[in-house]
Amino acid sequence: PRRAAPAAAAVGLGSAPETLIDGLAPQEFWAEYKTPAEDIPQWRKDLDLEAFGAECRAIERALKEQQNEEDVDHLRGVLNWSIGLYWAGVLAATVCNPMAWNPLAAVLISTAIMARWTMVGHHVCHGGYSSQQVEGDRFHRRTFALGPLRRVWDWLDWMAPAAWDAEHNNLHHYKLGEDTDPDLVERNFLPVRAGKYGPGPMKYLAVGFLMATWKWFYYAPNTLKELFQQDKDRAARRGDDSKTQPFTTGTNPTTITFAFEELFQGRIAPAVEMAKCMLPYFLTQFVLIPCGVGAAVAAFQGAAAGAAVGQLVLLNVVLAEVLTNIHSFVVIATNHVGEDIYRFATPVKPKSGEFYLRAILGSANFQTGGKVNADGSYKPAGVGGNVCDYMQGWLNYQVEHHMFDSLSMLSYQKAQPQVKALCEKHGVPYVQENVFKRLAKTVDVMVGKKDMIQWEAGRDYRYN
């Protein structure tokens, strides 16, 4: 039986989400909460969810049918730009200056790494191009980055592609905004919000540290944890209990500090697994590339020149790593958090009307480069629009991406005006703002200044 609605004070609206309500953890409380009719916003009462879902599915079908080789050519162009930017950055890094740092080189390398993850690896692993490829082709999701050699060739980063698939493609996309969403920022930042690392300025320092390090500090170990859990759960369903989970943090985020804590207590498994996951990228980026460039220069200009150039490349690659962490944090961590974004206490059926609704309410778009004609139909974005989308990792279409996760990048440009018009038709809130405004709202939630909207609470002063 669902609980009757308590008084607002008992519900604890506006309090920190870690506060217990009636002895239950907040999401347990909300999962049992019966929303009073007077607290449900009018747009929710008026929404024909079945009709809304049918129109969403129709948009998705049409977009998939329209995809063709042009989409794959666009992907190849994005990939080629990332390769060109990377090696242009390495070349620029060999040019000495008094500080031994070359900001242009670092920005080029940083942007290339970001693009390889957010646009190439991300959309291919989702299957966005699989309908235009056959298994065995490079951009098919069952081929791309699978196995050690293909990982190096297709998409080498701190995260293992299989771990990314388990954490992002499965859990994050189909548990969006739920307590089982591994990327739920409000839940992951409970220690910071509660002042564990200190008050006021210390909270912002904690956020700043994570921005500069999050790919190796948080994302690689947390995705690896979810991969082990997925394998363990699948084995258990087959009656096989031999699989183990070395990352025993439960629903709390796993960071690199967990591996060190375990190591100091004599448990080496987490550190071993993280080393296997992260060393290929570390050795390639910080050893092989600087040493290789240095050796090439040494062959023509002598050992001293080669050593100096190798050192320059290393310094700029390190700076690029910090920048690409910050860049990717700004365009990724801000997608599903803010005082105007919802979180949910119960599961949802994939591809149902409510699934599409949650994808919209639980996501925020940034400025998009896609263009529309006077009648609202799609037209090619042009150079300016594509640069806008490229620099935001094509993650500025987050609403459409969470509704339809297996489309190409070009399809998201086509989808955005259709989805926005559909939301206007049905009175569904559609959040779209400049990425830096979204960053400010994200940080407000991270430090505890603001809370996200709880769907089950019903109260929503912005849209009622």
Image: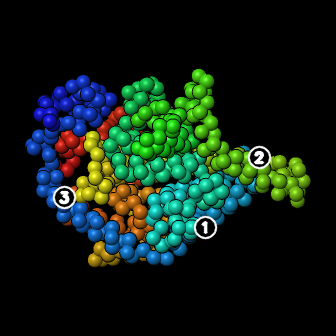
Cα–Cα gap, marks 3 and 2: 59 Å
Answer yes or no: do the residues labelled 1 and 2 have beta carbons within 8 Å? no
Which one is in front, 13 or 260? 260
- Of tags 3 and 1, which is closer to the observer? 3
Give percent across and percent down for residue 303.
88, 50
Give percent across and percent down for residue 237.
41, 44
Q: Which mark is residue 311?
A: 2
* Element at label 1: helix
Amino acid type at mark 2: Gln
Label 1: which residue? 80
Marks 3 and 2, the one that precedes in the sequence:
3
Q: Residue furthest top?
A: 265
* Element at label 3: helix
- Of tags 3 and 2, which is closer to the observer? 3
Residue at image x 27%, y 64%? 56
Amino acid type at mark 1: Asn
Q: Which mark is residue 173?
A: none
Marks 3 and 1, the one that precedes in the sequence:
3
Amino acid type at mark 3: Leu
Q: Which mark is residue 49?
A: 3
- Of tags 1 and 2, which is closer to the observer? 1
Residue at image x 48%, y 31%? 248
Cα–Cα gap, marks 1 and 2: 27 Å
